[in-house]
Image (spheres, rainbow, N blue to C red):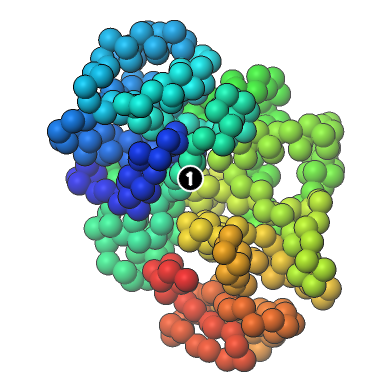
Amino acid sequence: MMDMVLRHSYLNEIERFLGKDTIIILTGQRRVGKSYILRSFRDKMSSQKGANVIFIDKEKHEYDNIKTYRDLNAYIDSRRNRKKVNYILIDEIQEIEEFEKSVRSYYEEPDVEIVVTGSNSKMLSSDLSTFIGGRYREIYVQALSYEEFRQFHTLPDDDATLANYIQFGGLPGLLKMGLDEQDAREYQTDVYNTVLLKDVVMRNQIRNVPFLENLVRFLADNTGKIISANNISKYMKSQGEGVTSTAIINYTKFLCDAYLIHKVNRYDIHGKRLFESNDKYYFEDHGIRNTLAGGSREGDIEKVIENIIYNHLRRQGYEVTVGQLQAGEVDFVCTKPEGQRIYVQASYIIADEATREREFGNLRAIKDNYPKYVVSMTPLVDRQDADGITHLHLRRFLTQAR
């Protein structure tokens, strides 16, 4: 049963910032589990003495009458208990007009803790930060990791489970659908359409929706490839779509704001600087990516593996860029604020010397002492170390923190 599966890492993160005069915001793509985490937190707080929980879910019709910040204030005031700690929990807060005015107002109150969710990063960069500055803590909620996928579906850690994860992705709602190809694809399509309509089209008042849909499919087909706005513009023109590079840059930003995709910059490893164009794009949920791309995974398995590794690195707390060398590329340069760094190269099967030289050679060209990994699905490989480079099987990589 889904209600029995708790995502403790996110709940622990919420509790870590309670009582620190900060507004806690769960962000991420729709349907990755933010609402469930907020409800889990609600249930936990409701059982504690001295706590008064005020919960609002803007995706439920019973809260339709809360349309503006004035409606929100009236709802909270009618349920507030000044003798207790009031936990104001609001799901999909961006659906309330001028919500930031309410957040700022209640933030100043000594008996209030605020935890909200939102599905658009623009809510942070403009709507909220204008009013409350840096007085919030963002907790980025991702689709299920491989380990969470196993836990949700009660599956063993084996190649069959990994194959299911590669194919279906990590939307928590798949637990109700089951791992049936047709049911899963229909559900993923519904989620994709909801994200596109509510968090991209409506929020940004996009008129050329067919182009937007073609753009997302192009990014699905080219996941993990270095592309530029000019490349996309040329391709779209070849398909009869005359759209400027500026429009493409705007549209991709809107998709990133909705957490549907993530843009990854290139980093000059030797020159230690970021390039200003030619980026890679990965999907928040590779299951949605697979649905958009269609077909089986035999033809694009390396793209999916790369997408999975990227999201896992983000989950581990790394800032991720694409490494550029004079003679080649390293898939991921991963850094943490405290200075920790690793390099990761993604591959499917390393079956011959030419492939081995390509994947390992680029890492050997980096003359520093930071850990270097090649991650693949090469049979019989669990972990091998050679020349300062660790070769890990994908399952091993996804089940160990680093």
Measured along the vertical axis of the image, is residue 179 above or below residue 388?
above
The answer to whether residue 254 is visible is: yes
Q: Is residue 237 left or right of residue 282?
A: right
To which quarter of the image does residue 55 belong?
A: top left
Q: Is residue 6 left or right of residue 97?
A: left
SS label for mark 1: strand
Q: Residue at x 38, y 30 (%)?
A: 114
Could you tell me residue 187's position as x and y percent? 40, 38
To which quarter of the image does residue 260 belong?
A: top right
Residue closer to the observer: 235 or 129: 129
Q: Specify the amino acid type for callout 1.
A: Tyr
Q: Residue at x 38, y 23 (%)?
A: 109
Could you tell me residue 197's position as x and y percent? 55, 25
Q: Residue at x 47, y 10 (%)?
A: 68
How many callouts does the rendering have? 1
Q: Residue at x 53, y 61 (%)?
A: 313
Could you tell me residue 16's position as x and y percent? 36, 48
Could you tell me residue 45's position as x and y percent? 22, 35
Q: Quadrant of the N terminus?
A: top left
- Number of residues whose C-alpha sits closer than 10 Å to that of mark 1, classed few (under 14), some (14–19) or many (20 or more): some
The answer to whether residue 296 is visible is: no
Among all residues in the image, which is located at the extreme bottom? 387
Measured along the vertical axis of the image, is residue 346 above or below residue 211?
below
Measured along the vertical axis of the image, is residue 293 above or below residue 194?
below
The residue under label 1 is 140
To which quarter of the image does residue 19 belong?
A: top left
